[in-house]
Amino acid sequence: MKKTILISIAFLFALSIFAQSPHMFNYQAVVRSPIGDILDNQNVSFEIVILQTSPTGTPVYTETHNATTNEYGLVTLKIGDGVTSDDLSAIDWGADDYFMKVSMDEEGGTNYQEMGITQLLSVPYSLYSESAENISDNSVTSAKILDGEVSDDDIAFNYAGSSSKGGPATSIADNTVTSAKIQNGEVQADDIADGATLAEILDDDGSGSGLDADLLDGLTSSFYYTPKVAFQVFNSFDDNITSPSSWQKVEFNSEKFDIGSNFDNTTDVFTAPYDGVYTFSAVVGLQNVAAGSQVYGGFYINDAQHSHFAAEAASEDYTSYSYMVGGSATVQLNAGNTVDVRIWCQDANYDIYGSSIGQTTHFSGHLVF
């Protein structure tokens, strides 16, 4: 008859052991006889079973070990390094409770006797965190990003919000994801603290715990990240106007540049892509303007008059050359606001003068911050 063996169990879940695979954690036991004597220098065998949810739950991993106790009856096993057809790395440690059932044959055979079942109250965190290494590149969404790990390429130009690209990663420990795993464009406004700068986002000196103003490390506001938004457009041909004393939208059919593609030369309207402060300037050339005719130029925001950049009477007849009016404005816009240029002239029939190189009627603007 087999002797009853008492086992004193100690689990060692070291955070740094066996880094970067294989997936293992230590198990130690002291083997004693029924009367408490240490069984030293003896061949023994173990069967280890990981059970999911409860002590009677579904086995998700099984392995066996042959070992020899030392002079103190101590035996050390590496769970994950036994004889098995299962995969310890496939266990989702963060998804459920797990229990370990230990069985042993004191003579080193396969006649295992159950020694006990113990809940794994401490997840093998080195294995749990290492699961981040198996995440596909460009699959991680905002909730899994480790503070301070956001790099320049991870920030979308449209930082006020971007759509999700790809499904969310699962079973990732919080604060374990590094820059290489972050899908480009997935860092959103909620992930960046108010007043945060690009320099503090990249901060890696370990002095802080989040995207907070105390990580600025003495940097000034000149390091604030401003997306590139700028345009310059012009009218390349004459546009005859036959509606006197009414505001006319000026046509700009050609672009010199449009960084960010925010000017529509079919509607002659600029649309702000972000909340911010913008500056605009415009010049409009007019012909066939009679002396004394009142002329006004202005910027319209969201189809409403915002500001005049000219309000004057022509000093002479402008029939053979252009009468130029122009000005500038700095305004605060919300994303989606529109800006266009309009002209008002008292004459019944006049022309907005165009040029193939954009030297007369033109409109430009850019995002300041």
Image (cartoon, helix red, strand yellow):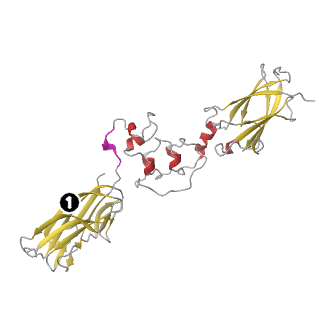
Q: Is residue 243 above or below residue 63?
A: below
x%, y% of residue 232?
Answer: 27, 62
Q: Is residue 102 above or below residue 34?
A: below
Q: Is residue 74 left or right of residue 233?
A: right
Q: Quadrant of residue 21?
A: top right
x%, y% of residue 329?
Answer: 22, 59
Helix, strand or loop for disc 1: strand
Q: Is residue 222 magenta?
A: yes
Q: Is residue 216 above or below residue 359?
A: above
Q: Is residue 330 above or below residue 304?
A: above
- Image point (28%, 70%), residue name: 253
Residue to which mark 1 is pinned: 328
The residue sitting at the right extreme is: 1
Report the span colored magenta: 219-225
Indicate the quadrant containing the N terminus: top left, top right, bottom left or bottom right.
top right
- Image point (34%, 50%), residue name: 226
- Image point (44%, 45%), residue name: 151
The one nearer the camera, 246 or 82, is 246
- Image point (43%, 53%), residue name: 156
Number of numbered discs visible in the structure rendering: 1
Amino acid type indicated by mark 1 = Ser
Q: Is residue 74 left or right of residue 213?
A: right
